[in-house]
Every structure is written in C-alpha cells, then in structure tokens.
Image: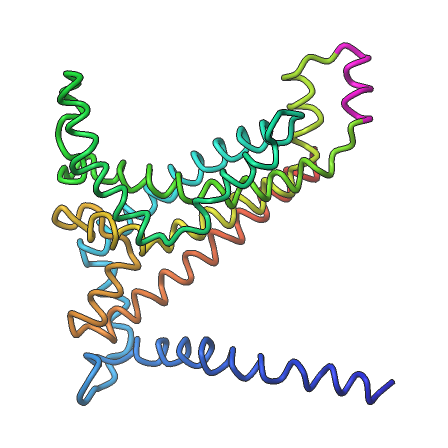
Amino acid sequence: MKSRQRTFLLMTIPALVLFFFFHTFPLLQGVFYSFTNWRGYGEWDFVGFSNYLNVFQDMRAWSAYGFTFQFAIVSTILVNIFALLIALGLNAKIKFQKTLRAVYFLPNILSILIVGYIFQFIFTLFLPQIADFLGINALATNILGSPDYAWIGVVIMAVWQATAFNVILYLAGLQTVSEDVYEAAAIDGARPWRRFWSITFPMIAPFFTINMVLALKNFLMVFDHIIALTGGGPGYATESISVLIFRGGFEGSQFGYQSANAVIYFIVIVAISIFQLRVLQKREVQQ
C-alpha cells in the first residue's frame, strides 16, 4: 500500500517541478524586481516601495484601470445573460439540438487573434458600408477609431467569443435539474417565469457563481482582444492593465515599475475573486 502511494506521489513531482519553474519562480522574480529600478537589462538598484507609490500617481495607469473595469463588468454581465438564455434554449426539446450546441460552441475554439482581425474588418469596412447604404449615420463611421465608442467594439467581440464557454457550464447545470420538479410545479399551476425564478435559477446557482467569477477574472486580464482589435487605441482609450504592463515592461524599459503594477493588480484580482465567491456562495445558501 505504501509502495503504491509512493508511486502516485512520484507521479506528481514532475508536474510540481514544472509548475514551480514556469509559474511560481517567475512570479517570485517579478515581486523581487518590483522593488528595483531594473529596466529589463543592465544594472539595477533597490528603490524600496517607490515603484508602488508611483503607480498610484500614474494617470495612464488609472486610465487603464478605468477601462479594464468598465470593460470587465459590462462584458461579464452581458456574457452571463446571453449564455443563460442560449443554454435554456439549447436545453429545451428542440430540433437539431446537438447540431446547434456544436455551432454555438464554435467561437470558443477559434483563436482570439483571428476573431479579433475578423471583427476589425467588420467594424472598419463592412459595418460602415452597410450602415451608409441603409442611411444609418450613427454606424456609418468606424467605432474603433472613436475614443468614446471603441470600447464597445471590444465588448461586442469579447462577449461573442466568450459566451460559448459559459453556455457549456450553464447547460451542465441545467442537466442536473430533474424533470419531475418541473412537472410537479406545472401541476401546481406555476407559470414559466415562476418555474425559472423559483426552481431553475436556484438549482443552477453554483454554476452561476462559477461563471461570474471566471468571466470577471478572465475579462480583468484581457490582452489578446485588445492587441487584435485596437492595439490599445485610439490613443490609450482601450489600453487594459495587461497591455500597459506588457508594453511598459518589455517595450518601455520599465520592467521594475511594471512589475510593481502587476503585483498590485494581482492582489486586486485575488481580492475581487474572494469577495465574489463569498457574496455569491452566501446567496446560494440563502436560496
């Protein structure tokens, strides 16, 4: 028995070593360099907490935080609304159910960069031409070129691409709800909305919690969507925290400073995720 346990333990060691060298060690290095003025090359000196203090006085960082949270909150809400509606439809007894499930999952397996370039073509050329032909002046210009509306284009693309994954999780949750419960509710005269609000939603509450936490965390770390669609522009209008850290750290010779920014953002994301879990899990218990 002990030999078997030792074998299983040895099987986990390679994964543990790889995780440490490719995840934990770089993380610790980043924390170390956040207390230095290292530019990514050459010599460096310890600067204490000055990098952290400078982040709070950096207007470009505040702008990036504002855009990132605006994008993440709106996208998280929209993704969960659309995903739940689609999952309810795909869970019903409809024709071509399996085919439709496969079609709705397609966006999740496409590369975000490819999706981004397709949406860039749509927003830049296709949509303005169609709007101009139909006489819709509000859509006749490229919204990605507007500092006020470019973020909407990023949200549309992100929601379209991310909804598929949440649909799968909601479908898994809906599969756990027994048909007997719905039949009993129907006999008692419960209408569709009443059945959804009093039966379906409480029963899939744990899946709602997971979807909300994962969606918000992923959108807070948005990077590929920005690079593919707007490059952070126009100006810095759609520059997310991840893009700012990447550009400042690897292209702007601010490795130490952006490491401090990354540490702060890591703490922010962890705090938000814990807060979300506690609030939503408390709601599950109350239901």
Q: Is residue 255 left or right of residue 286?
A: left
Position in image of residue 132 (x %, y %): 13, 22
Can you say which quadrant of the picture contains the C terminus? top right
Which residue is drawn at the image coordinates 67% and 83% (left, top)?
Answer: 11
Q: Is residue 198 left or right of residue 162?
A: right
Position in image of residue 234 (x %, y %): 13, 46
Which residues are the magenta region? Answer: 180-189
Count how many numbered circles sit on residues in the image. Answer: 0
Choose top left, top right, bottom left or bottom right for residue 84: top right
The residue closer to the viewer here, 204 or 227, is 227
* Residue 208, placed above or below residue 224: above
Can you say which quadrant of the picture contains the N terminus? bottom right
Question: Is residue 59 found inside the magenta-colored segment of the image?
Answer: no
* Residue 12, placed above or below residue 279: below
Position in image of residue 170 (x %, y %): 60, 39
Question: Is residue 182 found inside the magenta-colored segment of the image?
Answer: yes
